[in-house]
Amino acid sequence: MSLAYKLAFRNLFHDRLRLIATVIGIVFSIVLVTIQLGLYVSFQRMVTVMIDHTKADLWIVPRGSKFFEDSALLDEHERFRALSVDGVAEAVPVVIGFASWRAPSGGTAPVFIIGSDTRDEGLRPWNLIAGSLESLAVPGAVAIDRSYFDRLEASRIGERAEISDQRVEVVAITSGIRSFTTTPYVFTSLDRARSFTGTAANKGSYFLVRVLQGANVTDVRDRMRARLTNAEVLTPDEFRRRSTNFWLFGTGAGAALFTGAVLAMIVGTAIVAQTLYSSTKDHLHEFATLRAIGSSGAYIHKVIIIQALLSAAIGFCIAAGFGWLVVKITADTALPVVMTLPMTAILLLLTVVMCVLSAALAIVKVMRIDPVIVFTR
Amino acid sequence: MTAPVIEAIDAVMFLGRGASRFEALKSVSVAIAGGELTLLMGPSGSGKTTLLSMLGCMLTPSSGTVRVRDHSTAGAKPEELAKLRRDHIGFVFQSYHLFPTLTAIDNVRLALDVRSENSEQAKQKASDALAMVGLAHKAKSYPRELSSGQQQRVAIARAVIGNPSTILADEPTAALDAENGRIVMSMLARIAQDPTRGVLVVTHDPRIVPFADRVVYIEDGRIVGEERGVADFKHEAMQSQGS
């Protein structure tokens, strides 16, 4: 094995304090990027969480709907028009809207009602950790997520409260169904949702369309678009894209998270570059000696880049540990930081790129060394 | 004496810029032959180190020629100069310039490593080179664990391991006591017995003159004299080191 590895390793570990400073810089930067990206992915998932968990081939949405919670009302006529289109098997209504939750203590909280037919597989709660879906058919039954226990002052099956002055009882508890608006989702039957949100019986927020087996979804969508004049027909992907674009790019939230991640990268790169540069300056006579004894530029680059990569490896391992901790701590909060395998790979790549970029400054410094300085000391 | 391994022909060297620009070497011609130990002596500021740097392919002359074997350094790029140094020149520095984080054997091996020789054979060569300078038993020692004399001997082993045609030594005995100075010079003189290898030593130290085959005097950037025949003392000097 080339001595370049040993030299790089020893140079790095020779000055422990500087190594610690470098590693702190990398860890700080990568943890920050992890959190920003984790929030971004989490946000992205939350924005489309309802669309992702709805069993529908097509969505009939009010014209101009930008995201799931941005629903106006559709007339039942649109549903009948949809059902008359060739290839449509069913069009299931869903009603959504804001309402007020009142706990027995008197405390109130806004909630977001999601109502669909409990016998239908359209949009029902998932990730149940207590209770059952069948219980939602019981009058006054609702399902809540455990993330919002504190907000709703309810944490058990059987707890009672009021929504829009009507008595409700918690019959099912889910895990991880969070709203990006931080307003708790409350699942219930279609009729009760209409009642809680004051929606007329001939109205719906969305109609979830399932096509007949063997029918081409795109063809059915195109036929429906021609028939439905007061509503839009979207595939789940189209609706997902529209929601994501609105929240992440239309509102600037995504840009803010990205900017944060980029700033974290810049800060990290600057810290690593500074420490590598100063480490290189301290070893300048050694690099000059290498140059004097005939080392090629590539050999010196190798030593410095190995130093940078070693720093990256150490920094990334520690940062990954912190990242994992952040993911665990925030898992049950309203805004969890998400970490996926591809994200981890991206972060590793970013760490390596950051450290190698940082090494560039040190390399420029070393390549300007005049080997003659070996005679001056 | 054999053909020159390095030579400067009418080499002129300007250093500095603007008002501080000066002529450090003025039409210098000097040749280092294989099988010969040449001393370059002169007062401070006379141009010894500049000449050494030029012959060592670290600087290229402002005009004139420097040849290493058959290669001229004129117009050579830094990478080409590095290759010339790698292939033909071994350096011994006044303050050794060993790598403090590497053991003695790794310091020696480094000179092969930069030539992309990093096999088991390279380790054996490094071991042999250390044995040649009498430090086989110190192979695993770090520079801080070695005396000044031992450090300089490691540096000599590093300089010769690549089998260069020229060894350039800059004040190799300046930081050593008389005894270690004699040991180091004796080694350099022994290396210079090889007819394919020339040794040039820059020094202020008159005590090492007896080890030289030739002494070249430089003053104010010019070669002002040359003395041969000092070799009469050389045999005696080397014998006193038991060689």
Image: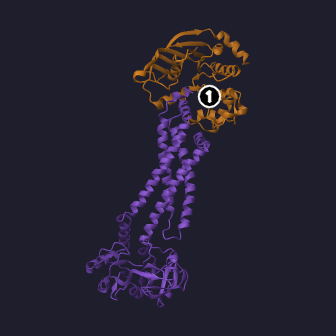
Chain colours: A purple, B orange
Circle 1: residue type: Tyr
Q: How many numbered markers are drawn? A: 1
Name the quadrant of the N terminus of chain B: top right
Q: Which residue is mark 1?
A: B96
Extreme residue toward the front, this view:
A106
The secondary structure type at the circle numbered 1 is loop
The image position of residue A290, as x and y in percent, is 55, 33
Residue in view at x 52 percent, y 51 percent: A26
Above-or-below relation of A179 to B78: below
Residue under mark 1: which chain is it in? B
Q: In the drawing, does residue A154 fall left or right of residue A245? A: right
- Observer-nearest of A346 and A220: A346
> Eyeballing the image, is A376 above or below A102?
above
Indicate the position of residue A155 as horizontal and vertical percent values: 55, 80
Which x, y percent locates residue B215? Answer: 58, 12
Vertical position of residue A300 compared to residue B68: above or below: below
- Point out the image quarter for the C terminus of chain B: top right
Residue A116 location in percent, x, y?
41, 84
- Residue A141 in view in this figure: yes
A60 left or right of B10 in image: left
Where residue A124 sits, quadrant-wise, is: bottom left
